[in-house]
Image (cartoon, rainbow, N blue to C red):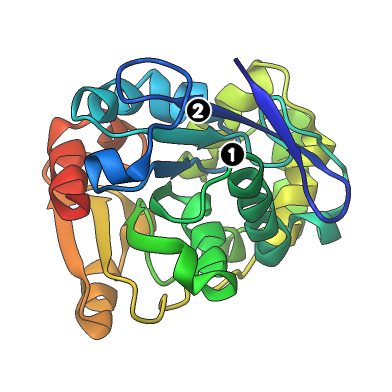
Amino acid sequence: MTRFSVSADGTRIAYDVHGASGGTGIAAVAGSGQPPILLVHGFASDPRVTWEATGWVRFLQRAGREVITVDLRGHGRSDSPADAARYTPNAQAADLRAVLDAAHVDLVDVVAYSMGTRIASAFAQLEPSGIRRLVLGGTGPLEVFATWRGDDVERMLRTADFAGNPIAQAVVGPALAAGADPAVLLACIRGMTGAPLLRPGEIPVMIVVGELDPVGAGAAELAAEWGASFASIPGRDHINVLTARAFKDAALAFLD
């Protein structure tokens, strides 16, 4: 059953709770000794595409972990304002806190992907005591939207012509084909452009990228600078790394 929380600015955020046994409730943390896992998807996607269709939710449940999935604002069933100021990393990090408050959860492990890593990074700054361990996937030190020219972005969203931008074609193309609102996507891009990937204090971190993913350029060096764990998934790119069992195994081993 989909639930909703309300963020500080009145935005309704949709989330789902997936119990470890396949149920819809969060078991007592004391029973397993482990907090729920919060999954944070990327741009122009939603939890059904990023986490359910790729097998993550089922995999984590079978491992005995409770899971919370969130529809980021502008995505899925959450509210979709067309105002760039409402898509900053801090605004979306506040959404995560609102969801956890609504679910009566104080502590989580986090697995975030692509744009979601910037939001999780901001959340770690706002709520450092709310995260036990953090997995950042499909990311690197360079924020990819900052490499897209503004006029090119508007043209791509208006015409669905992604010539010369294979990442945008792979990520944005399917979202537009599925009926995503170009004005909302543009607002999200503008709100997140240049968002830093901040070192999350003392929280243990793992960075995971596909070997063929250009978005992950510099990730190994960043992990070394942070003293974080690092995994490169052979033969995988920014899209298909999510289906890799090696990614799931590495993340679960780190979180356990």
Quarter residue 145 falls in: bottom right
Quarter residue 44 falls in: top right
Q: Which residue is mark 1?
A: 103
Rendered residue at 50%/40% (across/down): 41
Q: Quadrant of the N terminus?
A: top right
Mark 2 falls on what kind of element? strand
Residue 228 in the image, given as x and y percentages of width and height: 22, 73
Q: Nearer the viewer, residue 169 or 33?
A: 33
Q: Which residue is mark 2?
A: 17
Mark 1 falls on what kind of element? loop
Rendered residue at 59%/37% (across/down): 162
Query: From mark 1 to mark 2, how far is it between C-alphas?
Result: 8 Å
- Marks 1 and 2 in Cβ contact (< 8 Å): yes
Q: Nearer the viewer, residue 229 or 202?
A: 202
Q: Say above or below: 128 vs 36.
A: below
Mark 1 and mark 2 lie on one chain; the one further toward the N terminus is 2
**How many residues crowd around disc 1 within 10 Å: few (fewer than 14), some, or many (20 or more)?**
some
Q: Which amino acid, by three-letter code, is at mark 2?
A: Val
